[in-house]
């Protein structure tokens, strides 16, 4: 049993824990409504800065408006983000991406010389950080070729977390399904869109599942709660998994 810090920001706790951990399986107790989760999306967050040239707004032709060029990039990315729906994962659905923050300009009578966006891209099993960043760089390069004065720089990721992709025939996944079936619960393995420490354990070559009581829809809500009945059933599952894993 372990409790680690910093799961929601940079995962320093689980990273340190994995440095010396040796295990044949792991279960991360996130809220899954008593389903055995074998797949989850990864996440990549980074900034893109569009550079312009400052000028007085009375002579805008002397400058290069970074916000105008950023608008071109954001609209181009919107089309790309819609295209992600064409390649769904069987358990997770499509990859997704969101431009969640934009900053640009100092005051209204300046031609802005800088505009930044922050992107949250959710990764599917099989996607890599390098491959995804390469997709964005190619779109930037195409815009630069089509629009003179367009200069955009991708900054290093603020967060990069790989997806969880545990094989459904892994012994831990098979045992989880067996226990759930015996409890009268749904034994079918599933996927979730949110991230957790499970992907870091899997990266350390520890087959990992996510399983726990409650719903992720209530996480970070104004009123968070977990049904007591689900907590008790989760305890039964953990007990049986610990007792049976590796016994055959």
Image (cartoon, rainbow, N blue to C red):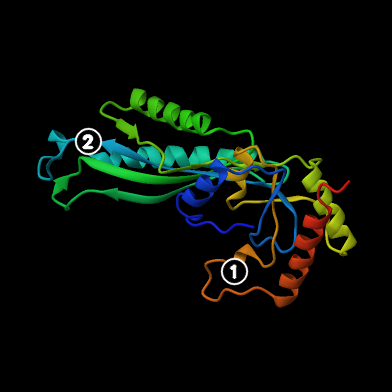
Q: What residue would you read off at disc 1?
A: 218
Q: Residue 48 location, x and y as percent?
A: 35, 39
| Quadrant (top left/top right/bottom left/bottom right) for the N terminus | bottom right
Q: Measure how far apart labels 2 and 1 are at the Cα level.
A: 43 Å
Q: Secondary structure at mark 2?
A: loop
Front position among marks 2 and 1: 1
**What residue sits 28% from the left and 26% below the top?**
148
From the viewer's perspective, tell me whether residue 154 is left or right of residue 234.
left
**What residue sits 70% from the left and 42% below the top?**
207
Q: Nearer the viewer, residue 229 or 235?
A: 235
Q: Nearer the viewer, residue 4 or 193?
A: 4
Q: Residue 92 location, x and y as percent?
A: 67, 47
Q: Nearer the viewer, residue 156 or 59?
A: 156
Mark 1 burial class by Cα count in 10 Å: few <14, some 14-19, many 20+: few
Q: Residue 226 location, x and y as percent?
A: 65, 73
- Identify whether 216 is placed above or below 132: below
Q: What residue would you read off at disc 2?
A: 52
- Identify whether 240 is placed above or below 10: below
Q: Residue 31 location, x and y as percent?
A: 65, 62
Seen from this angle, which residue lies furthest top? 145
Mark 2 burial class by Cα count in 10 Å: few <14, some 14-19, many 20+: many
Task: Answer with mark 2 or mark 1, whichever residue precedes in sequence.
Answer: 2
From the viewer's perspective, tell me whether residue 133 is left or right of residue 199.
left
**What residue sits 34% from the left and 26% below the top?**
144
């Amino acid at each position: 049993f372990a409790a680690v810090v910093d799961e929601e920001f940079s995962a320093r706790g689980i990273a340190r824990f994995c440095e010396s951990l040796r295990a044949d399986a792991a279960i991360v107790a996130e809220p899954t409504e008593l389903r055995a989760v074998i797949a989850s999306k990864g996440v990549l967050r980074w900034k893109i800065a569009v550079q312009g040239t400052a000028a007085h707004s009375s002579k805008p032709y002397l400058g290069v408006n970074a916000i105008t060029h950023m608008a071109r990039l954001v609209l181009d990315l919107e089309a790309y983000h819609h295209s992600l729906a064409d390649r769904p994962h069987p358990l997770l659905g499509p990859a997704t991406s969101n431009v969640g923050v934009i900053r640009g300009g100092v005051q209204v009578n300046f031609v802005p010389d800088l505009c930044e966006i922050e992107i949250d891209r959710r990764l599917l099993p099989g996607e890599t950080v390098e491959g995804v960043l390469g997709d964005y760089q190619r779109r930037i390069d195409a815009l630069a070729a089509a629009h003179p004065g367009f200069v955009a720089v991708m900054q290093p990721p603020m967060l990069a977390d790989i997806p969880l992709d545990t094989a459904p025939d892994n012994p831990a996944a098979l045992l989880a399904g067996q226990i759930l079936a015996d409890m009268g619960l749904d034994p079918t393995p599933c996927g979730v869109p949110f991230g957790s420490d499970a992907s870091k354990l899997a990266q350390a070559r520890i087959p990992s599942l996510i399983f726990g009581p409650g719903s992720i829809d209530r996480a970070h809500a104004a009123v968070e709660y977990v049904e007591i009945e689900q907590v008790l059933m989760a305890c039964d599952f953990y007990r049986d998994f610990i007792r049976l894993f590796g016994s055959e």
